[in-house]
Amino acid sequence: MAAPVTISPLVGPSLRGSRRPRVAIVGHAGAGKHSIFRAASSTATRHERLAGIGPAYEECLVEVGVDQISLVELPSIDGFHQLDETASVALKYLLWGDRWPAIARHETHQPEHSFAAPDVLLVVLDATSLTRDLELAQELMLLGKPMVYALNRMDEARARRKFLNVRSLSTKLGAPVVPTVAHMGIGLADLFSAVVRTARNAGAARAQLATCLPSPHIQAQLPGIAAIARDADVAAAFTVPEILLTLQLAENDGYFAQELLEHFPARHAELLAARAAADAALPRPLADEIHADRHHRAAVCHEEASRPGQEGEQPRWQRWADDLFLHPRWGFVGTLAVFALVLFFVFEVSAVLDGLTVARLIDWAAPWQPTEVAGVVGRAILDGFIGLAGIVIPYMIPLVLLLVFLEETGIMHRVAFVVDRGFHRLGLHGGVALPFLMGLGCNVPALAATAAVTHGRDRTVAALLITFLPCSARSAIILAVGGKYLGGLGVFGLFMLVPVVVSLVGKLLKRRYPETTPGMIQDIPPYAVPTVRAVLANTWERSRDIVTIVLPLLVAGSIVLALLAHFGADAWINVLLTPVTAWWLGLPVALGVPILFGVLRKELSLLMIFAALGTQDLASVMDTVQITTFLVFLTFYVPCVSTFAMMLKLLGRREAFYSVMLSIGVALAIAAAVRWPLELAARLGM
């Protein structure tokens, strides 16, 4: 029975292409806006300076479900009460983008790059310093743009016994407020969903206006200044919301008043007169009164949204778990614990299951050594089924069960968030952490899992890189041969070579597939206790293609290789592969057949090496350099025919054959790069 499919109806045309909204992240320094941008950003971001001066902004494309947004992180803003150069430029970009009005065209620093004004403002509020940030929020409301608030650093606020009624705060601000812990990724999926909903709602900014107007006693002193802002010529020259221009002219002697003096000197004289009248009617100068009033209203809003007690507080064990898996520093401890658990399954649980099942099947079939063609084909078919059992029973089922369990509990989502920035260096997102972990057991289920979490360019790059991860079979050979002849340090060096090669190949693939991958929001779901039914259903969903896709090619490959051996093609194969084995790798010519037959199942390589060389003591026929070179080559050489079968299904014929050529090329290059320095060192007696 097929797994149920959840269908989410579209609420309107998808926000992509020309409909894609532009979202600007704004806030004070230290509020967490960079953490939010970094968690959502793509593998490539654009860095530019606002009008060529001040700190740079960052911009990237982000996917939110079926929609997309252009996400911009603007430099930190303290407010518009006193406009310094950075705040002035930031305000211009929030208002006008790169299309500055007449009053700004005379300035020395002009926009240097295309920068459309944002459609939605994502305002980051620091839950530990909320009054300060609510003052900035009131000023940003004057821009008349739809807004969404990220109430960030909620974990620190709770630790300080500060609890906030998010629903009440949202009502008072007239816009969505989403609690977040940005550096842990908590709440970000809900935050960007709210951003997309707000972008669809054309009237989202109207509810905010009532909350940003000054108190009545100040409004009573503003009609004269408002008349100046409402003047047709002034309004056309400034092209800003009337209420914003009114308050800026009333409060500041900086940018707006200066431009009014330069372009409309008569109106500036009226402004000074209106200010003087207001100063005389108020207990403090008008500018100070506006600022004090804004601070008072922010403090009252904060106080009314605060509540004592621990209602809705996250359970203590969940906070401890998040500290283990999501903390910026300690999160890697939890990630390493998950890696260690996977490796335990690969080298302990899977090894035991392999010995109890597949190893016994191999021993049971060993006496059957047919000499006629029909018998050879029959034995090859049996070997194909044994090879499939060797993938499914010891490695696929236990590993997939384990990783599905971790995914259902919510732990794998946290691991993906922690390693996301590392995968960005490869042009990928942290969502591929699960397939990469599975690849340490077997590349076949890892490729199957890649299809579930990636698409397009990400799927291709992730699949190609997974083939360079040493599966359990290759790891077993490294441990068996390397441990005996190279020692622990040599084995460690071989395994440490893997991340270096994966990183280098990732850089190469970024050139072959240069398109920018949109940013993705890593969802951090709540912890859950998975049901047996859900775990088994997801395990079957990720494993069922193995029989239909891998088995036919595995059997076919087994038959071809068996017939080659039956008709005595071994010698010819060794001769044909001499340029590779003897000349390039410096290995005995007899190793050509084991290398070729190793694509069926890597364990066969080790058995066939002993048979081809006529001894199980490799040190008697190969020196240390040759053993090292062979192990390096085997580590990065084509994993197996089963992996090729999955690549065919996942990527198509062209990319599957490219993966084979890439694997062979990298294996030859890295093996030679290791061999030649070792040979030189041996000759120099080092």
Image (cartoon, rainbow, N blue to C red):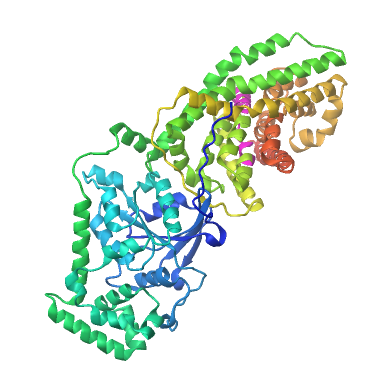
Residue 233 position in % (x across, y down): 38, 85
Asked whether residue 63 is drawn in magenta, I would say no
Residue in front for this viewpoint, 260 or 341? 260
Q: Position of residue 115 (x, y in %)?
A: 49, 68
Q: How many marks?
A: 0
Q: Residue furthest bottom?
A: 266
Asked whether the viewer can see residue 57, the reply is yes
- Residue 26 placed where, x, y %? 37, 61
Image quarter where the C terminus lies is: top right
Q: Position of residue 383 (x, y in %)?
A: 73, 18
Highlighted magenta segment, given as a residue range: 464-484
State the residue at coordinates (45%, 57%): 200
301 over 253 or under it: above or below: above
Instruction: In the rendered view, tell whether residue 150 sits above or below residue 285.
Output: above
Asked whether residue 400 is in view, the answer is no
From the image, give the main secondary structure of the stretch colored magenta: helix
Q: Is residue 483 magenta?
A: yes
Q: Nearer the viewer, residue 308 or 1?
A: 1
Q: Residue at x 26, y 81 (%)?
A: 225
Q: Is residue 96 left or right of residue 165?
A: right
Quarter of the image where the N terminus is located: top right
Kindly indicate the quadrant of the structure image that contains residue 478: top right
Examine the image and state in which quarter residue 246 appears. bottom left
Give the answer, above or below, for where 476 lies relative to 115: above
Q: Residue 561 versus residue 166: which sits nearer the camera? A: 166
Q: Quadrant of residue 614?
A: top right
